[in-house]
Image (cartoon, helix red, strand yellow):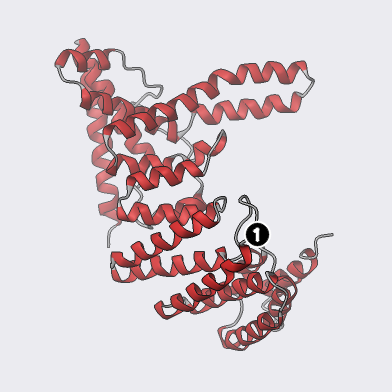
Amino acid sequence: EDPRTLPLAHLHLAAQYQRAELSHLLVEFVKRLGSKPSCFSDVMPLLKAVPAATRAEALEQLQRDAKAVTARPNAVLHDTTVERVRVYWTGGAAADIAPLLAKYEAALELGRDLKPSEHQHADGYALLAAHLMLNQFSATGDLSHVAQAGALLERATQASTHNHQLTLVLLRAHAILGNVVSFRDHFARLETKHIQFDSLGYLYLDHALFFADDASVGAYLAHTLHFFESGTHEIPEYVVKAYSNGSFHKIEEFREFAERLGQSQHRAWAQGEYIVLHLRGAKTYDEAKKILVALALPHDPTKPLSLPDNRDVGVMNAIVEQGTETPSRNDWIRFRTALLTGLAAVVKGDWSAAATLLEVAATVLASSVAAPAAAAP
């Protein structure tokens, strides 16, 4: 039986009913399981429920318990959990960064004999320090904090090559600084495959569209579309194999997978960008006309789009600054589809269709621009 199960259930009940012993139960849980990688994730949803009046005393007890752990690396992992609880409750400050960096340097010595695939015991300190640096940037606008976080995480990812949490925060730093080449290289280290690509591939795509050169964007868009198209073409073969092997439950999974690929926002976004990129590269009217005549976008722009957003919300919140997302990506996909198909109708001489589609594009654009303005204070 998982040793976390009963204590966690007790904690959640105490939080739900606002029991006075919540603070004590939290301290005891961390005392027993603070060295487990999941400990902070377990208690984080409950930290807000701890009364503010008891937090200082609870934190002092947590720090005393952490110092009592002498077996290393458990002592480092336990202290990392306590530091995360402290920063969560206090909000963290610039003064907290230097002590965390000192702890990181000291803890790195413990990982000298770890295998390349294992995470360094010191990673938690680096992550926490980097988040505080990025928080300083958000508060002051000083890019030196981002550069400092990037330098720290570059070093940390070299020591802990398979810790994707480090890589994701490093991606945020590179995105803020506009380091598109470094962003691309570190994104490739995530090795996103299969369905993960649908939920995480937008990370590089959105960033590259603003900062990368056309050749890099084109290569990535071609890779993206190949993933979706090859996945769609291979699914019937997987269904046949599942049927032949008697794995009938897999058939429904493949059907859902095919539906997800066909209705992917990421795919529709990439399709539109790929066509726009080729149009921008056309040197003559005839080249542009050829691209538009061959245009084949899967969605009808005269009807509202409801493509599901498959992006990983947790990752999105870690990488994308709040407030930078467009109100509705579906609206922008519909606008671009209407505009492109309208232009295609123009070069084909279908003036009626062109008028209808370009009117749809204008309407969608106007509503998309008006929506944020209406919501503004």
| 344 sits to left or right of 234 | left
Seen from the viewer's position, the closer of residues 216 and 251 is: 216
The residue depicted at 61 percent of the width and 57 percent of the height is 119
Residue placed furthest toward the left: 284
Above or below residue 261? Residue 113 is below
Please state the horizontal and vertical placement of residue 2, each as a whole percent of the image: 80, 60
* Numbered label tally: 1
| 258 sits to left or right of 152 | right
The residue depicted at 33 percent of the width and 34 percent of the height is 217
Please state the horizontal and vertical placement of residue 202, each as a whole percent of the image: 42, 41
Q: Determine which quarter of the picture holds residue 335.
A: top left
Residue placed furthest toward the top: 349
Disc 1 crowd rating (10 Å Cα; few below 14, some 14-19, many 20+) is few
One can see residue 248 in this view: yes
Residue placed furthest toward the front: 113
Above or below residue 309? Residue 257 is above
Q: Which residue is mark 1?
A: 113
The residue depicted at 50 percent of the width and 54 percent of the height is 158
One can see residue 351 in this view: no
Above or below residue 211? Residue 270 is above
Q: Is the C terminus in the top left, top right, bottom left or bottom right quadrant?
A: bottom left
Seen from the viewer's position, the closer of residues 163 and 2 is: 163
Above or below residue 355? Residue 177 is below
Q: Determine which quarter of the picture holds residue 302.
A: top left
Please state the horizontal and vertical placement of residue 365, each as a whole percent of the image: 25, 38
| 206 sits to left or right of 247 | left
Name the kind of residue labelled 1 in the image.
Asp
Which element type, helix, strand or loop, lies under badge 1? loop
The residue depicted at 76 percent of the width and 71 percent of the height is 10
Q: Is the N terminus in the top left, top right, bottom left or bottom right quadrant?
A: bottom right
